[in-house]
Amino acid sequence: MKRWEIVRAGILSDIDAGAFEDGRLPGDFVLAERFGVNRHTVRNAIKELESEGALRVQHGVGTFVAEDFVSHKLDNDPRFTYKLHGQNKSVRREILSIAQVAVGPEIAKHLEIAPSALVTEVKSTSFINDWPLATGSSYHPVDRVPGLAAAFEGSNSFTAALKRCGIIEYKRKWTRITARRPSQQEAQLLRISSSSPVLYETNVDVTPDGAPIKYAFSVIRSDRYEYLIEAEN
């Protein structure tokens, strides 16, 4: 067995054992010292594992276990969990808080309600394979989505909760994506450095007749996430 193959086997063994904290591999120097080889040998092993789909190399950022990476097809279907079923991902959402609050003019405009109108604010964090992926808040008009707080009892699914509120069908009206640095609290929730760039997504969901039922923002780890936009035929 060649040296790079020994390194490849060792890295795969570590992946299976969950040895890489936060899904990130150590640097080339650390791996080279561990396996008693040079950096070129380590890079050959990593290149092979990347071609096999076991690792994902993000130049200038690091090397990551590929199973923690998410590809999100951007369309008018807002059901995030549904889209990940074919990617062999374990998805869960942790509800941080639910409360009724009065919204400011910006959110009110997107929801087409009066400023200071009451909405249900849901703060949550999403996890992929037990690693944090995104955190954010969503806002739902109380009169259009009644009883939302109670609807989450026993479930962390937005789709299931909305069904309990009588909303069976809804779709994405628009999505806006930018990039920024996370706040200290966001960085803690996502287990990243406050200097790490994140994706910042805002969106609005509407019922079939066009009534807005949700305005939301999400702060997403950019090292584990990509948007896929396919051109229509």
Image (spheres, rainbow, N blue to C red):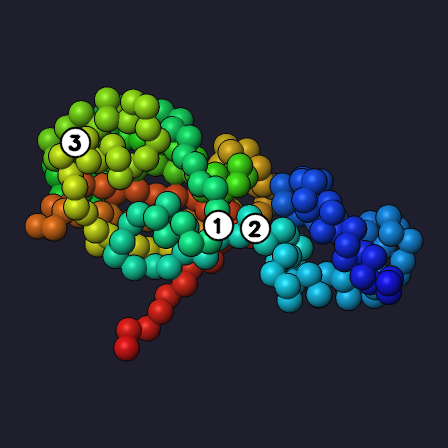
Tell me residue 121's x, y (percent): 28, 30
The disc, 3 or 2, on the residue closer to the chain's N-terminal end is 2
The disc, 1 or 2, on the residue closer to the chain's N-terminal end is 2
Pair 1/2: label in front: 1
Q: Give the class, few, some or many, for how many residues have Cα within 10 Å of label 3's Cα (few <14, many ≥20).
A: some
- The kind of secondary structure element at disc 3 is loop
Pair 3/1: label in front: 1
Q: Residue at x 48, y 39 (%)?
A: 127
CB atoms at circles 1 and 2 under 8 Å apart? yes
Camera-nearest residue between 133 and 46? 46
Camera-nearest residue between 74 and 138? 74
- Amino acid type at image mark 1: Asn
Disc 1 versus disc 2: distance between alpha carbons?
Answer: 8 Å
- Residue wearing tag 2: 67
Marking on residue 165: 3
Q: Give the class, few, some or many, for how many residues have Cα within 10 Å of label 2's Cα (few <14, many ≥20).
A: some
Q: Give the class, few, some or many, for how many residues have Cα within 10 Å of label 1's Cα (few <14, many ≥20).
A: few
Q: Quadrant of the C terminus?
A: bottom left
- Residue wearing tag 1: 88
